[in-house]
Image (cartoon, rainbow, N blue to C red):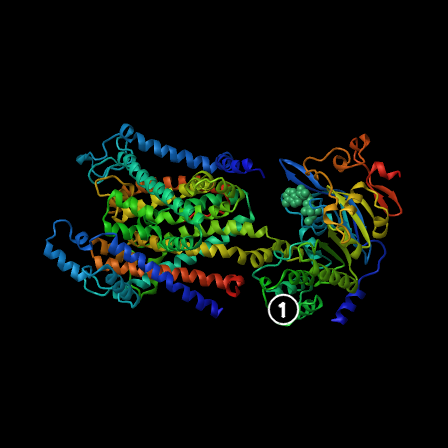
């Protein structure tokens, strides 16, 4: 096992610049005859070996951002309406289906939120791990199986050899998520998109899976976009954080900076709603109001209707994402401060 | 898997008993006095009593029930009042015709229905999908004798491609197939209509599943997403429908055999009806009871092959 | 949730059910076509004595086995009776037998399903097992068995067809009953001392109505088909009654020379079943895409 991991780390190329650059990405859905952006003007860089966390309430467009990168925006209801996704010198938004398919699962992989439904119930776990190796590496069945078994061992499935030919329903949620990780890592991707990989799991198992992910990320030398709605998890795993609200990034900074100086009012409120052991649950602050639906966005700042610091100018025009030394905030009230 | 098969076989026993009980209720209790039914209102008292003795309906109902169940389970299904031959012999003689027809219809239905349904699902809401939906709805609206008559008129009477009477000898393979074509198409298109519709809707459901997204995220090509990842899952409800349809098929084969004048269980029933052969009818109902149970059993076993959750669970 | 609000819930359910059905009509062209054709057939059947060009039993011996022409649009049969007139009158038999059988099955079946689901426990288990066995009988075979032993008459036909259709209605009514029974407002009703019967009729029935009506439409098609099939086999209404299946049977005997005798009633049967299936299918899609019709 160890040899395989080392080889993976060494294979990552060292050309300078970010491995992934998302530029003004807009992804829209059609409803009632019009296209409404679910992700709007999202930009970020992902450096090599870096973990960037995407944080925000459910429905704010985190998954759609990841799916846009994967080229898996559900058709025909949705589409990438604008922007660029640069990956190793190529704009993924310009690639055709076949070229995109070759990248998916090979150089960019994704793990999903729902371990219970994300594995095919009628195919063996071993086959599902080995499959990517057939398509991307042209391996024979035997070779792919051997490699798949190795992967199942790396993600710490107990008695992996015996369980190789088992079906997903014979595994617990935590074990299934490990299988998902093995699938995603099969071809040693350069970028891993982890979409709330622990949200559906029990708390104790969450910690195990998180630790495993962090370990493998280092071992494989990957870069990772880690999606979560839990800021508590962010501190443990990420280097930088982008906070999303209603389809937009409202604040982006390093973890240290963000926790030390949360600037956007929404980030502040999010911080205060992190559950803590030393606080009574009843005191936990929740954010008043609701996220606007994508077909009824306010014209100015999208957070304004719920914002405690709202001023008339907030509702006039959409605020820009501004700031310096890597800490950017989308707030006209706080930006100057 | 073996455990699963054994379990299904054991479960089939109570079902068989229940189905046979319903047959008993229908043939012995519902008509009141079968002897009266057979001989009509003008029959003499003496003739009635004779017949009752012969049919065994003079005994108390509980005894009748036990006799009936025992006979049915031991393969002792009585004999024809007209020919005097045992029901089992008569059934055995025509069974190959019925089996030919049924198997051909199922194959035809699956071979047309599964690809067509899949294709339709992949072109959801395109004109081709809409056309497939309407045509399949039309297909399953045909009573088997209506489609049979239209086929007969078109291909046997007008075009003369096939014989009008599909009897034929079993030992001549060319004849056997030639005689099978139209009846099999007749049963097969109705089945294809059912299979198409269910395949379509179940395929649509499967294509929206999370594990299909996982497959795409792995870079599995479209073809394999459809054939390897989706179809087997989509077939699970299709098996249910084929199972249900096998029941309808039993009924429709009666009509098909009449229209194409083809020997088989259905023809046997109709001639028993025409000759008022009460014991033959009763025996045939027992045969149908067995068929129903066998059909259910086969459906259950097929699930086990398709869906790993069933055989392990 | 306040008690008053809780008890108001089912009324919304009923309105909701109707609204769902209406939505089905507004969105589905085939439903409209199906309904239109079906209503047209009903109208023809009702007006048969007025619009039929001839008496359906009147024999025109000179005009035996005439092909379709200006006088006899659909031709005449072996007794010189006008096929069109017989078809128009025959529609009445198909519709009456089909709908009486379906409506009886609908009432009895839903009652069994609701009560069984509401009572629950072993009774429910036993009842549903009986329903499962009944349902495993193909309706044509069941109908054939019953009519074969009872003899063909209108009453027996209706009885046989209704019997085969009870189980699916019981099934479809039971499933939502079990879910609704556990909702708060039913508890509230009990607490207020409403009788079980009242709860079932006033609060549960409206919630299963939409599904029952959809299944009813589909079963009306099946009932008509079974009736026609039994008549074709010779277990239907006795001649000279112009039942559609019986007309096909008579025509089938002379199919080599006079095909129209069997073609026109065959098409009539196909048309009414197709129309009902279009209607039921569209409604089903709207009410619940997962609801599967029985057979
Ligand atoms: N299939 C879809 N059809 C229409 N709108 C969708 C669809 N999927 C997502 N959306 C829209 O995109 C928004 C963002 O969804 P998503 O990225 O899944 O949120 P998150 O992952 O942050 O919880 C949702 O609020 C919804 O409005
Ligand atoms: Mg999400």
Please state if C103 lies on the left or on the right of A197 as rendered. left
Q: Count the labels in the image.
A: 1
State the residue position of label 1: A141
Residue A46 seen in the current view: no
Judge the density around disc 1: few (<14), some (14-19), many (≥20) Cα neighbours within 10 Å.
some
Where residue C227 appears, x then y in whole percent? Answer: 31, 45
**Residue C150 visible to an observer of this rendering:** yes
Q: Where is A132 relative to A3, above or below?
A: above
Q: Quadrant of residue A215?
A: bottom right
Q: Relative to B306, is B222 on the left or the right? A: right
Residue at 49% x, 64% y: name it.
B305
Answer above or below: position of B55 versus C120.
below
Q: Position of residue C262 (x, y in %)?
A: 29, 43
Q: Residue C90: x, y in percent?
A: 28, 37
The part of the image, by quadrant, that contains residue B17 is bottom left
* Secondary structure category for the residue under label 1: helix
Outermost residue, top side: C50
User: Disc 1: which chain?
Assistant: A
Q: Where is residue C197 in the image (x, y as percent from the top left)?
A: 41, 41
Q: Camera-side residue: A145 or C205?
A: C205
Q: In which quarter of the image is the N terminus of chain C?
A: top right
| Mark 1 CB near ligand 2 (8 Å cut) | no
């Amino acid at each position: 096992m160890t040899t395989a991991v080392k080889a993976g780390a060494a294979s990552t190329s060292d050309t300078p610049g970010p491995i992934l650059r998302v530029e003004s990405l807009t992804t829209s859905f059609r409803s009632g005859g019009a296209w409404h952006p679910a992700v709007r003007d999202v930009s970020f860089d992902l450096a090599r070996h870096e973990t960037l966390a995407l944080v925000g309430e459910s429905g704010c467009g985190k998954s759609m951002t990841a799916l846009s990168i994967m080229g898996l925006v559900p058709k025909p209801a949705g589409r990438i309406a604008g922007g660029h996704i640069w990956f190793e010198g190529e704009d993924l938004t310009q690639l055709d289906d076949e070229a995109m398919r070759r990248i998916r699962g090979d150089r960019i992989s994704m793990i999903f939120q729902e371990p219970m439904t994300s594995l095919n119930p009628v195919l063996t776990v071993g086959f599902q791990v080995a499959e990517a190796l057939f398509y991307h590496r042209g391996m024979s069945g035997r070779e792919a199986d051997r490699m798949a078994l190795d992967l199942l061992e790396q993600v710490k499935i107990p008695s992996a050899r015996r369980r190789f030919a088992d079906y997903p329903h014979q595994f617990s949620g935590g074990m299934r998520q490990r299988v998902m990780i093995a699938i995603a890592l099969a071809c040693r991707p350069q970028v891993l998109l982890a979409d709330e990989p622990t949200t559906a799991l029990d708390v104790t198992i969450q910690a195990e899976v998180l630790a495993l992910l962090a370990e493998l990320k280092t071992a494989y030398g990957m870069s990772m976009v880690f999606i979560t709605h839990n800021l508590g998890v962010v501190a443990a795993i990420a280097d930088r954080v982008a906070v999303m609200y209603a389809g937009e990034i409202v604040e982006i900074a390093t973890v240290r900076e963000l926790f030390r100086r949360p600037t956007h009012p929404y980030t502040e409120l999010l911080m205060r709603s992190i559950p803590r052991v030393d606080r009574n649950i009843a005191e936990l602050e929740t954010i008043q109001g609701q996220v606007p639906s994508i077909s009824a966005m306010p014209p100015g700042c999208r957070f304004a209707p719920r914002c405690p610091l709202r001023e008339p100018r907030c509702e006039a025009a959409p605020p820009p994402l501004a700031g310096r030394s890597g800490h950017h905030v989308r707030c006209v009230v706080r930006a100057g401060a | 898997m073996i455990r699963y098969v054994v379990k299904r076989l054991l479960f089939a026993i109570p079902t068989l008993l229940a189905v046979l009980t319903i047959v008993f209720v229908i043939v012995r209790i519902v008509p009141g006095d079968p002897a009266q039914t057979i001989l009509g209102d003008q029959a003499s008292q003496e003739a009635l009593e004779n017949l009752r003795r012969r049919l065994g309906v003079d005994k108390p109902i509980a005894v009748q029930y036990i006799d009936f169940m025992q006979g049915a389970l031991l393969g002792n299904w009585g004999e024809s009042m007209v020919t005097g031959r045992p029901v089992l012999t008569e059934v055995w003689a025509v069974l190959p015709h019925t089996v030919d027809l049924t198997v051909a219809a199922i194959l035809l239905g699956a071979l047309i229905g599964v690809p067509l349904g899949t294709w339709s699902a992949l072109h959801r809401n395109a004109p081709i999908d809409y056309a497939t939906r309407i045509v399949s709805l039309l297909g399953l609206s045909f009573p088997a004798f209506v489609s049979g008559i239209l086929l007969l008129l078109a291909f046997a009477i007008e075009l003369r491609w096939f014989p009008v009477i599909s009897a034929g000898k079993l030992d001549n393979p060319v004849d056997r197939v030639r005689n099978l074509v139209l009846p099999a198409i007749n049963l097969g298109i109705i089945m294809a209509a059912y299979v198409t519709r269910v395949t379509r809707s179940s395929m649509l459901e499967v294509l929206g599943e999370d594990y299909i997204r996982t497959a795409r995220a792995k870079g599995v090509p479209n073809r394999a997403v459809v054939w390897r990842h989706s179809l087997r899952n989509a077939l699970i409800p299709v098996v249910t429908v084929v199972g249900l349809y096998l029941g309808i098929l039993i009924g429709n084969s009666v009509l098909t055999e009449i229209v194409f004048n083809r020997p088989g269980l259905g023809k046997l029933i109709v001639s028993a009806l025409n000759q008022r052969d009460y014991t033959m009818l009763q025996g045939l109902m027992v045969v149908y009871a067995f068929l129903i149970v066998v059909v259910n059993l086969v459906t259950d076993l097929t699930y086990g092959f398709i869906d790993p959750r069933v055989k392990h669970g | 949730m306040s008690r008053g609000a809780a008890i108001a819930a089912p009324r919304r359910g009923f309105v909701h059910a109707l609204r769902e059905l209406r939505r089905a009509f507004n969105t589905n062209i085939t439903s409209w076509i199906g309904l239109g054709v079906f209503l047209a057939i009903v109208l023809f059947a009702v007006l048969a004595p007025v619009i039929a060009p001839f008496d359906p039993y009147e024999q025109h011996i000179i005009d035996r086995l005439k092909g379709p022409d200006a006088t006899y649009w659909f031709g005449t049969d072996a007794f010189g009776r006008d096929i069109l007139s017989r078809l128009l009158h025959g529609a009445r038999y198909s519709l009456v037998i089909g709908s009486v059988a379906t409506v009886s099955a609908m009432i009895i079946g839903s009652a069994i399903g609701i009560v069984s689901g509401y009572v629950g426990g072993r009774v429910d288990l036993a009842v549903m097992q009986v329903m499962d066995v009944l349902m495993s009988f193909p309706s044509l075979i069941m109908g054939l068995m019953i009519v074969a032993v009872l003899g063909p008459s209108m009453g027996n036909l209706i009885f046989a067809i209704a019997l085969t259709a009870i189980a699916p209605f019981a099934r479809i009514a039971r499933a939502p009953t079990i879910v609704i029974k556990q909702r708060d407002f039913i508890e509230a009703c009990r607490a207020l001392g409403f009788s079980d019967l009242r709860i079932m009729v006033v609060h549960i029935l409206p919630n299963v109505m939409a599904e029952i009506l959809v299944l009813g439409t589909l079963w009306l098609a099946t009932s008509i088909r079974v009736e026609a099939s039994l008549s074709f086999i010779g277990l239907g209404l006795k001649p000279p009654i112009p039942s559609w299946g019986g007309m096909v049977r008579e025509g089938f005997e002379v199919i080599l020379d006079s095909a129209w005798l069997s073609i026109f009633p065959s098409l009539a049967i196909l048309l009414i079943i197709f129309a009902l299936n279009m209607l039921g299918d569209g409604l089903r899609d709207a009410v619940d895409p997962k609801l599967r019709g029985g057979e």
